Amino acid sequence: MKRSLILTVLVLAAACTKETTAPPPTSTQPPPKPQLAFVRDAHSYANPSEVRVEHVALDLKVDFAKKQLSGTAALRIEKQADAKTLILDTAGLDIHSVKLQPGDASAPFVLAPDDPILGRKLEIPINADTAGVTIDYTTHPDARALQWLEPAMTAGKKHPFLLSQSQAINARTWVPLQDTPQVRFTYEATLHVPKELSAVMSAENSGARNADGVYHFKMPQPIPSYLLAIAVGDLVYRPYDNRSGVFAEPATIDAAVHEFADTPKMIAAAEELYGPYRWGKYDLLVLPPSFPYGGMENPRLTFLTPTVIAGDRSLVSLIAHELAHSWSGNLVTNATWNDFWINEGFTTYFEHRISEKLYGHEYSEMLWQLGLTDLKDELSTLPPKDQGLYIDLGGRNPDDAPGIVYEKGALFLRLLEETAGRARWDQFLRTYFDTFAFQPMTTKRLLEYLKTTLPDVVKRVNVDEWVYGSGIPANAPKPASQAFARVEADAKRFAEGAPARSIDMSKWSSHERVHFIQSLPNLYPERLESLDQQFHFSDSGNSEVLSAWLEKALDSGYKGVYPAVERFLTTQGRRKFLKPLYERLAKSDIALARRIYAKARPSYHPVSQSTIDEILK
Ligand code: BES
Ligand code: ZN
């Protein structure tokens, strides 16, 4: 097994170096490469080593009244000659019929009983000459990937909105498919939506409104299922240039275009680091505030929370992050969710490199340090078995996976960089993305590749401790920001009794404010009140400053922030902000937590709902 992996790696590497005679790869055509061996994925029922879905054609009606998608998914398959069954993942789907040929009667199929995490296995018997199947189906109104927003939950307040979040294993709640990141398919789609709305997908988007409400999409690059995405709403498009631009509601578009104006520069910086952007366009979609994540790297169209629109472009490292996924994650893809660090650790490292290129070393050190604070906080809550980069998620929903792989993974790559030297390391990463583009990557395969390519580096860092061990290894790089050192001195002074007005924050970035707050010990309510009077943290329009402040205040038992907490929890639904605040409220005032949640829950995405349900159950 080990042998054959090394061999595959070598063959691929060789195929990549003798490119002198072959035409250069165009941006729309991935170089044809053999699929690497499949490994077991505990989060999918699919049998891709026998039958593999290679193309999906959707024809769906978007029904806001019923909160349903209904129509057909036609799957083209590639199979072993003796394959007898196509196995798909589904969850909450009503399957009306399965046809092996258009015009046939429904073929037999078996839907297994429901598993609360994995959903229902769909088994379709196939023949020697079966080239594909067409499934007629309807989604459930509670489909975990989808959120159906009432007009009141949008910026414009006039039209409903639909948004999806397929990562990690939610694609199966809106399309029957092989929901494992090891299977890649191209896709096309026809969507029928209300005439006054626009539809977009993680595919080629024209940006134009179609008066008849019918939208066609094509996605020529093969993607794993978790990158399948859809949004429908009152959207307008404004280009930055011919490669990137912003989709948003009319009420949000101006602020969004201003906030993310560095996007073209970020793409250029990313390409300079690790090679050509291979997906054609890179657009942003600003969603209503209930979007459960900061961002989601849907190919060609990053999905974004509006909570990063701070007015001063201070939170745009999130764009750098989602853009970086166009290499780490979307090109080279974690083979299973246990290998999630291969997506997020690499991306967080790459994100910091883009920030450094655009905004300088001192700036990116601040971001590294903020990340380190989060990492330490989370590590202190996790059992040792969940503290490695590789995490066994069997039996759990990967949506609830620990987040430590982001910063711990990034630190590990920074250690490799510091050990190899930047030039050599960058060359390594560039070749890695080229070699494994459009392929799944396991932790094992990556470590083999690292050992063959940078043997001296691997000998000098303790790889196994990083990947399988707990905590932060002693050889971890130590990010250091001078600005933060000054901020810490002020926090210490304040903690020792200096008055709030003696601190001058007027020239501080939001990162310095966040670091100041996080550097404070728990304080008496009067002290926190004096800070709030001086600096108005409770009214901050910067969501990172606000959430850091509210967390610190609740940790200190300062009830004066309750109204601000309630406002924040009822006006946005980003899980990263909701979770720590509900956890704290659940400890200090469970009745209040439940009252706020009763009001807010209908406006949260199913992903956030299930996390908060768990906290307040
Ligand atoms: N791909 C993730 C979001 C995700 C992870 C969705 C796992 C579902 C399961 C995305 O790239 C991400 O990491 N978003 C972060 C922002 C980032 C700057 C740390 C977020 O949402 O906060
Ligand atoms: Zn990410």
Image (cartoon, rainbow, N blue to C red):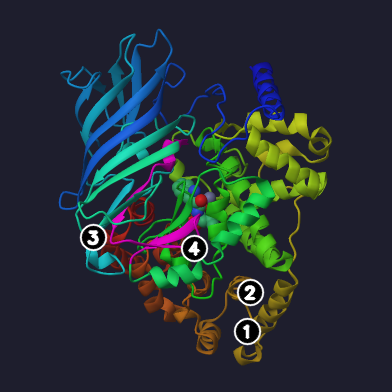
Whether residue 377 appears in this view of the structure is no
Q: CA distance from mark 3 to mark 1?
A: 41 Å
Q: Which residues are magenta?
A: 221-249
Residue 552, percent across and down? 53, 72
Disc 3 Cβ-to-ligand 1 distance below 8 Å: no
Q: Amino acid at mark 4?
A: Tyr
Q: Secondary structure at mark 3?
A: loop
Whether residue 58 appears in this view of the structure is yes
Give the residue at mark 3: 160
Residue 236 on the magenta span: yes
Q: Of discs 4 and 2, which sits in the foreground?
A: 4
Q: Are marks 2 and 3 in contact (CB under 8 Å)?
A: no
Give the residue at mark 2: 512
| Left or right relative to 403: residue 291 | left
Q: Quadrant of residue 353?
A: bottom right
First in sequence: mark 4 vs mark 2: 4
102 above or below 223?
above
Q: Amino acid at mark 1?
A: Met
Report crowding for label 4: few under 14, some 14 to 19, many 20 or more residues within 10 A (C-alpha): some
Q: Amino acid at mark 2?
A: Glu
Residue 277 on the magenta span: no
Report crowding for label 2: few under 14, some 14 to 19, many 20 or more residues within 10 A (C-alpha): many
Q: Secondary structure at mark 1?
A: loop
Give the residue at mark 1: 505
First in sequence: mark 2 vs mark 1: 1
First in sequence: mark 2 vs mark 3: 3
Residue 482, percent across and down? 75, 72
Q: Secondary structure at mark 4?
A: loop
Disc 4 Cβ-to-ligand 1 distance below 8 Å: no
Q: Of discs 2 and 3, which sits in the foreground?
A: 3
